[in-house]
Amino acid sequence: MQENLIRTHSSGFGEPLAEDEVRATMLIRINSLVKGCSGIRLSTVETLLAMLNQGVIPHIPEKGSLGASGDLAPLAHMVLPMLGLGRAFYRGELLSGKEAMEKAGIEPIRLAAKEGLALINGTTVLTAVGALATYDAVELIKLSDIAGALSLEVHQGIVDVFDEALHRIRPQYGQLATAQNMRNLLSGSTKVVRASTERVQDPYTLRCIPQIHGANKDSVSYVKSKVEIEINSATDNPIVTESGKVISGGNFHGEPLAQPFDFLGIAAAEIGSVSERRIERLVNSSLSGLPSFLVKHPGLNSGFMITQYAAAALVSENKVLAHPASIDSIPSCENQEDFVSMGTIAARKARDIVNNARRVVATEIMAACQALDFEEKQVGKLGKGTQVAYDVFRKSVDFIENDRDIEIYDELEKATAVLSDGHLVAAVEAVVPLVLEVR
């Protein structure tokens, strides 16, 4: 029966989950099983651990889970190679599960009572995908502060709006943190100004960075707290308690994370949306005071014109993806499983939104650095944190003089890579701290 469960439940569809998502799935499943509540042999868990350590990566199609009664279909694909079945990647090559296990020197197993169910019943895949997306979102939020600070310097923005006293009378944690981050990033900058009778305030995308970015920080911090609980939980069914009592409950249900991951997608979408509006302010000559599309000889050269188009397309796509998955439900299992979470869909959507938003923020940083390199913007010095960000970015992405000198896709890819590998945030944080909340 246990083997039959694995053979018939492995009904996934689509592209395989990425290697880091599969490895996270395996690790979280192991951590759940070692709680001792699942009725599974230690030797079976050790087989899964050996696969993780020796690089046997099960081929898990990303679609097919309702996120209730757990991630049954994708987790069944995870288990297949343990039985010498299915498919798995080993050292970058897709092999049969049997061949992958043989090359790794791991003996396939036969399942004992309850073990098939113990391995596939739980929120593990949605948690793994969502946990990685949450980690990336934390980095993205820091990058958005850096991007906003650079854009502010291009526009000689008013810094009074980051005064701590202003935000203490509305002490939202993320808002306070963003204002502090901006003060630290811009410390020592002579490219920013104070409010005056000639110029009282900036547009919202600059003036309201603490309020907008701060709301996103609060959302991501909430999701992070839910993920930290889930990755250290037993989500199997039925559960065997310490006293030996067997309870058929519902810890496999994904609703506690489905809603947070929808929330994560909304927050990441907003990061991209506000960043795209700042890109528009950078490339629009009537708003920036610089040549159209941030190129010295517009007309003959298109410069950054289509980078804003591409960012706008990603932002529009994110608006569609941000529609909540958790508000949907389709009954299954002869109406026994009559309300499901769609949490795995929520996690995958959040991941895609974060990736899209990262590209938008990379475009903003690239455009801001381009703007800062124009002669009329070279007066004064950057802030303590923005100078580091600029220097790191310019090591990978150069100023664009003429269209014929570059292929813009390649430049955008370089910009995205600088953000994705964590190097830019790490370099800035070595000089100034970037926090998610201040209480």
Image (tube, helix red, strand yellow):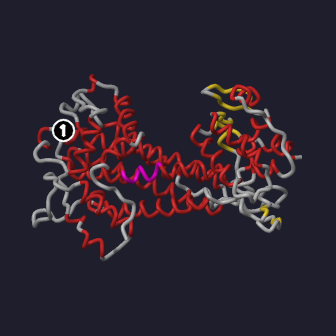
Taking 358 as reference, is 262 above or below it?
below
In percent of the image, x 42 and y 55: which residue is there?
270
Q: Position of residue 378 (x, y in %)?
A: 13, 42
Taking 87 as reference, is 120 above or below it?
below
In the image, 268 versus 108, the foreground residue is 108
In the image, 428 versus 174, the foreground residue is 428
Q: Position of residue 241 (x, y in %)?
A: 77, 66
Give the structural element (helix, strand or loop) at label 1.
loop
Magenta span covers which residues?
A: 136-142
In percent of the image, x 66 and y 59: which residue is there?
254
Q: Position of residue 407 (x, y in %)?
A: 34, 26
The amino acid on which the numbered mark 1 sits, given as a three-letter code, is: Asp
Taking 89 as reference, is 20 above or below it?
below
In percent of the image, x 70 and y 49: which residue is there?
65
Q: Position of residue 15 (x, y in %)?
A: 63, 36
Label 1 packing within 10 angstroms: few (<14), some (14-19), many (20+): some
Q: Is residue 435 magenta?
A: no
Splitting the image into 4 quarters, where does residue 243 fall? bottom right
Q: Main secondary structure of the magenta part?
A: helix
Task: Please identify the residue farthest to the top as the structure is shown.
Answer: 404
Q: Image check: 310 left or right of 134?
A: left
Q: Image check: 67 left or right of 308?
A: right
Splitting the image into 4 quarters, where does residue 237 fall? bottom right
Q: Is residue 137 magenta?
A: yes
Total count of labels: 1
Which of the image's four quarters has the C terminus?
bottom left
Which residue carries the number 1 mark? 373
